[in-house]
Image (cartoon, rainbow, N blue to C red):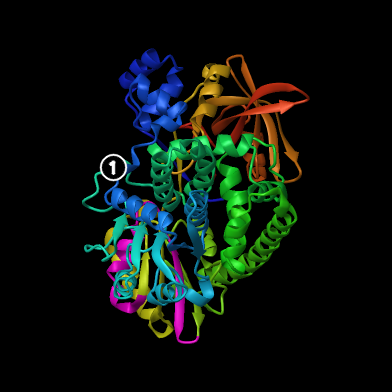
């Protein structure tokens, strides 16, 4: 395991003390809230216990009033409406949200989600032509379209009204669509700039429901939007947090339409209290597997099923997603082995600040996951390319200190197409230009990256003596969930502490122990921490630990338990153990 730099997040102690008094929360919890920009009792309430009333007025979004009026007119006149989505979780849930709403309002609606291998990413003129040939007169894109000027022009030429709803970074000029809804538009003053695609779609749904007097439908739609919001790794603060927290509560409580229920049952999550982990690592991979390994329509159809008469169909579709996810895992593992071999053995690949790896016939559906795993393994930006003849399709993932989209824009002349975010992007290019691309993107990286940007870090929320760990603090930490980008699960440091007992091995990979400080004793678990066994044995009288807090329930008894994230010698005692 590599050594990580322990970094304590800065916080204003005076502001934390003031917030603790105003909001009646423990000081350690107040410190966490202040570090996340939360000040004042009302902001604390909105963060810890948001309600639907905390959702912003959707009509604050530029062009939303125009879009909603056009959708309402199309519903009233029974025009054929099409929702154009995307094949990831955000795109699928966005499609489901808007299609289901329009159906409930009496509209004649269908959807089109491009297939990764056949259609590629995004909104393109052939899709516009296909929908026009089916008699569609209104197309609403979700989670795509903001960088599709050709598609917008083709829609206009065919007299098809195109409404674009998206959350990706726009170009300098907006597409020539009937309406363009994107909180990142420079001329849009909407207060939440970081909505997921499902969040933007939910704002259209919220407006349609409000105008139709059907706001009671909104909670059922929020839980679908929560799936896309959490899966798309947008900041879980502000309105995104409201969507995620309320949606998870609804996903946990039920009841659910037959399709969603079948998905939860197939993942063994029915009736359980769900958190962001369950969405990110259990549900989202299943939904994504449809678009990665077969067709995203499997996932969309499943989530659209609502009647009990469709229970058998729902179970079959959910099983298809599980099988596709298993195939995805196998394909991903095989490509990851080959990619890591290239990084480790080829200095032209692994010797640079940006890892650019390529392989013939690598499954395009999984190269984005492989890129993420390379970032985790090497703490470097990673670009994984699948070569198919003369064309290479790439998925890019980055580290916090490197703007991947900006890097691609500096190499734009090399690509047939590209787009994405600061931390994740995609591209297509001539396979013969891969060496040139590797050289150019790394020349840029060498100019902007500091060695510290590529050093693994352990982010800490502060020091927490064992004496300050209380049930009230744990309850407050649990209310801070769901955790994710911009609201990470709190990790604290404490020490020096001593071991009361252990470390004892659990299933050969994990360690169990107790930690003690001045009479305060807590159980602790180090998952996959067997590498620390020797160090802990030799430093059992004085060790510093980084940890998160969890509630452990065993045989009806609850206790606070520490989950160990890292260990090291107390400062000044010597060199830190790799952690």
Q: Is residue 80 above or below residue 234?
A: below
Q: Position of residue 54 (x, y in %)?
A: 39, 31
Residue under pointer 1: 60
- Residue 465 at what x, y percent from top left? 51, 21
Q: Is residue 305 above or below residue 293?
A: above
Is any atom of residue 353 visible in this view? no
| Callout 1 crowding tier (Cα within 10 Å): few <14, some 14–19, many ≥20 | some
Start-end of magenta stretch: 389-416
Q: Using the rendered image of the protein, determine whether residue 535 is visible from the camera's viewpoint.
A: yes
Query: What residue do we see at 54% from left, 61% from top?
Result: 369
Q: Quadrant of residue 60?
A: top left
Q: Position of residue 481 (x, y in %)?
A: 51, 33
In the image, residue 414 sits, relative to residue 231, either above or below, namely below
Place of residue 503 in the rendered image (x, y in percent of width and height, measured from the top left): 70, 34
Q: Is residue 54 magenta?
A: no
Q: Residue at x 60, y 53 (%)?
A: 303
**Quadrant assignment for the C terminus:** top right
């Amino acid at each position: 395991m590599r050594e990580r730099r322990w970094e304590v997040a800065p916080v204003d102690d005076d502001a934390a003390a003031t917030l603790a008094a105003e909001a009646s929360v423990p000081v350690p919890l107040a410190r966490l809230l202040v570090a996340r920009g939360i000040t004042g009792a009302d902001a604390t309430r909105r963060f810890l216990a948001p309600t639907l009333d905390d959702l912003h007025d959707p009509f604050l979004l530029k062009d939303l009033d125009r879009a909603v009026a056009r959708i309402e007119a199309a519903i009233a006149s029974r025009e054929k409406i099409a929702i154009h989505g995307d094949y990831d979780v955000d795109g699928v849930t966005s499609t489901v949200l808007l299609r289901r709403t329009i159906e409930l309002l009496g509209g004649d609606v269908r959807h089109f989600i491009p297939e990764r291998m056949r259609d590629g990413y995004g909104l393109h003129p052939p899709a516009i032509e296909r929908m026009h040939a089916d008699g569609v007169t209104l197309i609403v894109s979700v989670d795509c379209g903001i960088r599709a000027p050709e598609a917008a022009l083709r829609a206009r030429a065919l007299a098809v009204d195109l409404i674009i709803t998206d959350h990706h970074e726009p170009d300098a000029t907006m597409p020539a669509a009937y309406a363009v809804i994107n909180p990142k538009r420079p001329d849009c003053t909407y207060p939440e700039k970081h909505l997921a695609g499902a969040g933007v779609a939910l704002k259209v749904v919220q407006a349609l429901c409000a105008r139709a007097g059907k706001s009671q439908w909104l909670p059922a739609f929020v839980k679908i939007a929560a799936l896309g919001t959490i899966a798309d790794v947008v900041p879980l603060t502000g309105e995104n947090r409201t969507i995620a927290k309320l949606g998870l509560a609804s996903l946990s409580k039920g009841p659910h339409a037959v399709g969603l229920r079948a998905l939860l049952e197939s993942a063994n999550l029915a009736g359980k209290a769900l958190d962001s982990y369950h969405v990110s690592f259990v549900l989202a991979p299943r939904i994504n597997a449809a678009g990665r390994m077969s067709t995203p329509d499997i996932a969309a159809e499943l989530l659209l099923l609502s009647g009990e008469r469709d229970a058998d169909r729902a179970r079959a579709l959910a099983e298809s997603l599980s099988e596709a996810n298993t195939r995805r895992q196998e394909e991903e593992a095989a490509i990851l082995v080959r990619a890591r071999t290239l990084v480790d053995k080829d200095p032209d690949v692994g010797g640079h600040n940006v890892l650019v790896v390529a392989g013939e016939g690598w499954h395009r559906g999984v190269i984005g996951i492989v890129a993420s795993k390379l970032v985790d393994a090497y703490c470097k930006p990673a670009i994984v390319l699948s070569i198919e003849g003369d064309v290479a399709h790439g998925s890019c993932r980055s580290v916090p200190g490197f703007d991947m989209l900006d890097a691609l824009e500096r190499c734009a002349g090399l690509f047939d197409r590209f787009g994405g975010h600061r931390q994740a992007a995609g591209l297509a290019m001539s396979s013969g230009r891969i060496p040139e691309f590797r050289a150019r993107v790394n020349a840029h990286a060498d100019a902007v990256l500091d060695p510290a940007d590529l050093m693994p870090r352990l982010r800490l929320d502060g020091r927490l003596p064992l004496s300050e760990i209380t049930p009230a603090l744990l309850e407050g930490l649990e209310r801070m969930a769901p955790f994710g980008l911009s609201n990470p699960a709190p990790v604290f440091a404490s020490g020096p502490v001593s071991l009361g007992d252990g470390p004892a091995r659990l299933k050969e990979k994990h360690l169990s122990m107790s930690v003690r400080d001045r009479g305060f004793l807590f159980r602790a678990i180090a998952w996959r921490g067997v590498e620390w066994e020797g160090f802990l044995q030799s430093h059992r009288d004085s060790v510093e630990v980084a940890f998160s807090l969890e509630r452990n329930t065993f045989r009806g008894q609850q206790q606070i338990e520490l989950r160990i994230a890292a260990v090291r010698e107390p400062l000044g005692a010597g060199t830190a153990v790799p952690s």
